[in-house]
Amino acid sequence: MLEELRITGLGVIEDTTLPLTRGMNVITGETGAGKTMVVTGLGLLFGGRADAGRVRADPGKAVVEGRLRLPDGPAQAVYARIADAGAEPDDDGTLLLSRTVTVEGRSRAYVGGRSAPVSVLGEVGEHVVAVHGQSDQLRLLRPAEQRAALDRFAGVEHEKLLATFRETYAQWRRVADDLADRRRNARERRQEADLLRLGLDEITRVDPQPGEEEALREEAQRLEHAEGLRAAAQLAHQAIAGGPEATDETPDAGSLVGLARRTLEAQAGVDRVLGDLSARLGEVATLLGDVAAELSAYQDGLDADPARLEAVYERRAALRGLTRKYAEDVDGVIAWAQRARDRLAELDTSDDLLEELDRERQRLVAEVAELAARLTASRREAAGRFAEQVTAELTGLAMPHARIEVAVTPRPVGHDEPVAKLPDGDAGVGPDGADEVELRLIAHPGAPALPLQRGASGGELSRVMLAIEVVFAGAGGPPTLVFDEVDAGVGGQAAVEIGRRLARLARNHQVLVVTHLPQVAAFADRHLVVAKDTGGAVTTSGVRVVEDTDRARELARMLAGLPDSDLGIAHAEELLAVASREKAGASGRR
């Protein structure tokens, strides 16, 4: 859950801290006091888009900080992700998140005290929090969002089936596009292939080898200076052998070193230092012998053949011809040739390949159609359960005669796409299956089933969306749920029922509710009030926790706009008592 939220320099909020608790946290306040900034701050904290226009000119930077304590399930995924970003939780297991936005629009994110990409905050937020506001209600009116909502509700096995379908559909799309492109652009492909083959033929004739260029350069240098190299090697060999004027009686370097070693070795028993030097001279003698042998072999192997030098020159010229055309060096030429071979395979328009691709396309078409049909069956089964559960929630939200239908209908068949055989006819298969999904409301018995955007008033839409969220929450979801004035357009008994439903959600989730309804606020486990201060030169807002009498005064203000009215306070206290009894009864029934 989110234990604490601190907001600095955002909108009308100068600097305030929201201490949050488990269960239901309610945020209330006068219109314009800054309740929206709390939700905006949450959005920033979890990777939302930064709006520099909301940053206060003084201090010129908005900062949002939050401390999370995660349950085991989400914690594993979140901690694994932040570890990839080089961050870690605090010693007490909590995780500190932070986001800053400057008036210039620059944004920085911090996770566990370490700088991190803003996207990491977004990934953490996906596991931790779900924000539901009036904009989310509008979003859920779109058919694609309704289909996605049904897919989420359908369960894990359905999501696995959907993932398999999408992967297979993407494979079909790639093969179909590849086949169409090869057929459509056959002439251009053949022209490109001819040019590539010319280059490959030239490279194949030369047959360059990795590292050959440097080896030829070194060989050419040896051949060009063969006489000087031979003279140097000969003189060095003679010096080791005793000098240019040496005779058979003249000791060589190895003999002299050997004499020195034996002389020192004879005294090694007297002084260990001379024994160590004697051993080192033994190593020198061995090394001299090796060098003498290698110098002799070097002279024998040194080639001064002009014909070989000419061949090396010609080979280097051939390699330079390739590097002028295809790459900066021989290794680059070899890499170009490999890319050309790969590209030739892509450009292939032979009848055999086209037939093979067409067979693969047909196989994938059949597989996509079969998976789409299974997906439709799964959606229709989930649609019945989803409609039943949402309808049951509507009964508890003062809409006892309303029913929700989830229509899963065949998608129209499009041009050149797979066709799924469904019980009610053929359906065109798109990236999300063969279905169109639409939520419909039957407002009362005898009323037609109408799409939500046509069949629900503002207040009814709020209750339908809340019912959907309650159903979703029962199927899992993030541990923290945020509701931003989802009760707009609702009042009376329906408002009480909304409070009950949110309190019920709060048994298994941390719930944050921004509301203007006292009937909803009365069910809170913690009540926070956003208050505006207009006493200074600049308007600011802060947040405080209200309890007991202060809470009753806030509810009285929400009820009648009169926080000091004895009648209003009495009404507020009665509302709090009713909510308390409801929560106690619900807790006892669990």
Image (spheres, rainbow, N blue to C red):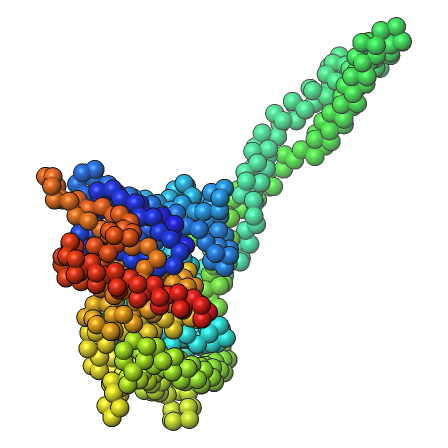
Does residue 92 lie above or below 465 as drawn? above
> Residue 530: image x %, image y %?
22, 51
| Viewer-proximal residue among 469 and 374 | 469
155 horizontally vs 122: left or right: right
Residue at 49%, 44% in the rendered image: 92
Image-quadrant location for residue 480: bottom left
Residue at 32%, 77% in the rendered image: 396
Residue at 14%, 57% in the rendered image: 565
| Viewer-proximal residue among 267 and 227 | 267
Q: Specify the quadrant that holds the N terminus.
A: bottom left
Residue 471 can be seen in this image: yes
> Residue 523: image x %, image y %?
31, 63
| Viewer-proximal residue among 9 and 243 | 9
> Residue 181: image x %, image y %?
38, 74
Image-quadrant location for residue 43: bottom left
Does residue 145 lie above or below 28 as drawn? below
| Viewer-proximal residue among 308 and 546 | 546
Image-quadrant location for residue 564: bottom left
Residue at 33%, 69% in the rendered image: 500
| Marker count (numbered) | 0
Does residue 215 lie above or below 520 as drawn? above
Residue 146 can be seen in this image: no
319 horizontally vs 27: left or right: right
> Residue 344: image x %, image y %?
46, 66
515 horizontally vs 196: left or right: left
